[in-house]
Structure formats: C-alpha cells, structure tokens
Image (cartoon, rainbow, N blue to C red):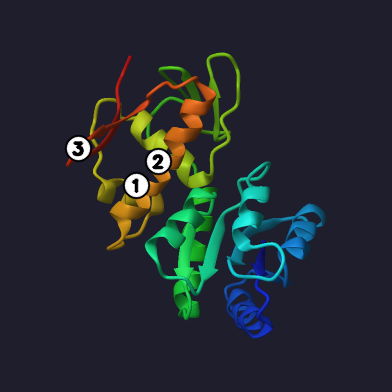
Amino acid sequence: MKILVVDDDREIAQLLEIYIRNEGYEPLSAFSGEEALTLLRTEQEIGLMILDVMMPGMSGIDVVKEVRKDSKIPIIILSAKTEDMDKIQGLISGADDYVTKPFNPLEVMARVKSLLRRTSEHVTDDTPDVLDIGPLTINKDSHEVKTITGTPVQLTALEFGILYLLASHPNRVFSADEIFERVWRQESIVSAKTVMVHVSHLRDKIEEATNGEKVIQTVWGVGYKVESH
C-alpha cells in the first residue's frame, strides 16, 4: 500500500517517508496541493494521505474538499494551527484525523495504522448485511448508503462507521466516548469534540440527501441515537 505525504516542507516529507517505509508501506510525496491531486489520479493503490494545511497555492483544506468529491481515502491533516476552529474546519471539510505541528512521527504512524485498520476491517457482528433506517439503506459490506429513492449519500469512512454503529443498535444511546472508542478504535481526551464535529457533518449530508430528515437524534447530556421505525 502507498501512503501519500503532501507538505511543501521537504524535510518534513522526508522524515515521514522514513517512518512510513519502516512500517512496510510505500511512501509517495507531493509538495503542493495540485501535485497531490495529480498523483491521486495517476497512481494506483494509494491507501491514505497525510496532508499539510498551510501550503502556497492550493491549501490542504481545498485539497480535502476536492478529493471528497469522489474518494473516501483516509486523510490525516497536519497543521501548525492549534485553534479549535481550525481543527473543526479540517474535520468538516472531510478529513478523518488532525495532528498539530510539531508532531511525534510515532504518533502520526499510530494514527495511520489505526485509520488503515479501521477502513480495511469488516464488521464481524451478527447484524444484517443491509440495514434500513428511516429514509436510508445502509450496506455494511460495500460501505454504501442510499436514500429510499436510490440517491447515494457520500460519506467518509468515519462518518459511515458512526452511522452504522448507531443504526445497528436502534434506540440505544451512545456517548461520544463510546462512539470514539468503537469507531476510531482508540482513546482520546478530545473524543467528545471530535465526535461532535463528525456527527454534525454526517447529519448535514443526510439531511441534504433526504430533504431534511432527522435520522440521528441528540440525547442532551448523554449522546446520540438512531430511532427504530
């Protein structure tokens, strides 16, 4: 599997290349957003992208938005920005994870492996292959979500994971910490905020595709649920 590093700082790109190669993956580097998009179109088997936000020309956020038009590739954003709104902007644009600079390369690789493991694993419980929840049909094997009229709902791997978790346990309320641990498969002190951003973006996509249907309910002070119909 190839991992694409996108950063205009060549020293950072070269450092990450070393760690990526040591983990058994093949590193690729791009030094601008435009170059990254070209590689994504021309290279085969790119399984994940590590993307800097602040680059001359096309920003990392713009790259994410462009990629998300037709790809669910896992994306980890790197940025020197540490403000919460900057993190939220990165996540809302479609990124799966966010790491601030300066960073520990070992932490970045741990997040890489976690994302790849999560996107490659199939659900192993006894839930049906296809779930029908309200206006949505969810296929766990193909990771596809469609409305009852057949309109596809384009979700990232994390968004699909959240929706499938809630839909496969209708009426059960999951706390943000539970969702984070089950979907992200790791613990984090910022889990609640991260989950909130992804749920908000997931809701926006569902409501846009279903003319405003409220599929995911918030139980204030407790968490989130999907009601059975």
| For the residues bearing labels 2 and 1, Cβ distance under 8 angstroms | yes
Q: Nearer the viewer, residue 10 or 4?
A: 10
- Residue found 64% across the figure and 76% down from its top: 21
Identified by mark 3, the residue type is Trp
Distance of label 2 from label 1 (alpha carbons): 6 Å
| For the residues bearing labels 2 and 3, Cβ distance under 8 angstroms | no
- Residue found 53% across the figure and 57% down from its top: 116
| Category of crowding for the residue at label 2, using alpha-carbon neighbours closer than 10 angstroms: few (below 14), some (14–19), many (at least 20) | few
| Image side of residue 5 versus residue 197, left or right | right
State the SS at label 1: helix
State the SS at label 3: loop
**Residue pointed to by mark 1:** 196
Identified by mark 2, the residue type is Ser
State the SS at label 2: helix
Q: Outermost residue toward the left?
A: 221
| Quadrant that contains the C terminus | top left
Q: Where 31 sits versus 130, above or below? A: below
| Category of crowding for the residue at label 3, using alpha-carbon neighbours closer than 10 angstroms: few (below 14), some (14–19), many (at least 20) | few
| Image side of residue 55 versus residue 103, left or right | right
Q: Nearer the viewer, residue 165 or 101?
A: 101
The label shown at residue 220 is 3
The label shown at residue 200 is 2
**Which label's residue is closer to the chain start, 1 or 3?**
1
| Quadrant that contains the N terminus | bottom right
Rendering coords of residue 145 (x, y %):
53, 28
| Image side of residue 90 versus residue 66, left or right | left
| For the residues bearing labels 1 and 3, Cβ distance under 8 angstroms | no
Rendering coords of residue 181 (x, y %):
32, 52
- Residue found 67% across the figure and 65% down from its top: 4
- Residue found 49% across the figure and 42% down from its top: 122
Rendering coords of residue 88 (x, y %):
43, 55
Identified by mark 1, the residue type is Met
